[in-house]
Image (cartoon, helix red, strand yellow):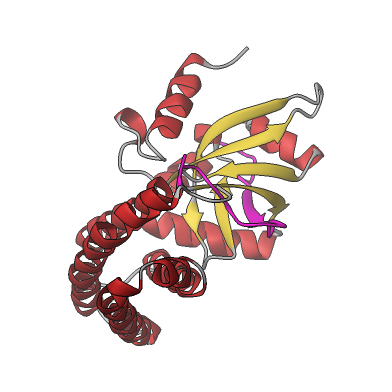
Amino acid sequence: MPNPFNQQVIEEFRANHGKVGGFFEGARLLLLTTVGARTGTPHTTPVGYYPDGGERVLVIASAGGAHEHPDWYRNLVANPRVTVEDGVFTYDADAVVLERAERDRVFARAVESDPGWAEYQAKTDRVIPVVALHGIEPDGPPNVNATSMADGLKVIHDAFRRELVLIREEFKKSGAALGAQLRVNCLTLCQGLHNHHTGEELGIFPLLAGRHPELAPAFDRLGQEHERIAELLAQLGEVLADEQVGPGLALAEVERLTTELESHLTYEEEQLIPLLTSVGDPGW
């Protein structure tokens, strides 16, 4: 029988493209659908996650420090192929339980970010597992949780905006040293932005520019802004590569990126969303 609390979170998550309030407000959350180990039926559970460089995300089977593993963990051990909803994309993934050495390294990173994980571990004799969810490349275009290309562009942009808010809040809460997980969060964002802009330059920009040659100046500006943001991403990457860098300098780079990216996203939405609406969303 579905958990009423979880079901409410699931519905809010899907209705708001990953943004929820209440207990999970401001948290990185995904919906994890596993196949029941005994029943073979799908079960969807809201689970907090950590970015891990873009190729995978990490989830922790804490169950609040309970002495037994959560049901979703037992399910994915029996059936490692899962479905992930991150608010923007829905995709299949292979769940891999991390071996002890890697688990300990990643769990320590999580504890540094949120000491509550250590409190959960202290409550139980079991070693709390850490699971990597490796996204599987789809045969076709990615499955965007949107009803149209115009809506999809706004959903993707808003996800970047939310992530930047989270990262800046994490900087404000950090101590004198720049935590390892916060570095990973920043680098994952950088990779995501790079991938998004590359996809636009190969797909949506040529499509729309071919249909609207009169808007060549707007596409030239968008291309120049992509180059500028790429420079800022590279500069942030250089700062994060310095093991001695403090949070203040890294945050300054993040703030610079945020300012220019927000201006770019707003301009791109003003220019492209009306065009995408008029295209009629072919193939969506």
Q: Is residue 187 visible to us here? A: no
Question: Residue at horizontal 22%, vertical 60%?
Answer: 266
**Range drawn in magenta:** 124-148
User: Along the line of sight, which residue is nearer the eye, 162 or 199?
Assistant: 199
Image quarter of residue 36: top right
User: Along the line of sight, which residue is nearer the eye, 275 or 51?
Assistant: 275
Q: Is residue 258 visible to us here? A: yes
Question: Residue at horizontal 24%, vertical 68%?
Answer: 264
Residue 279: x %, y % from top left? 43, 53
Q: Quadrant of the N terminus?
A: top right
Position of 147 with respect to 169 (left or right) is right
User: Along the line of sight, which residue is nearer the eye, 116 or 193?
Assistant: 193
Residue 118: x %, y % from top left? 46, 48
Question: Residue at horizontal 73%, vertical 34%?
Answer: 75
Question: What secondary structure is the stretch in magenta mostly built from?
Answer: loop
User: Along the line of sight, which residue is nearer the eye, 152 or 29?
Assistant: 152
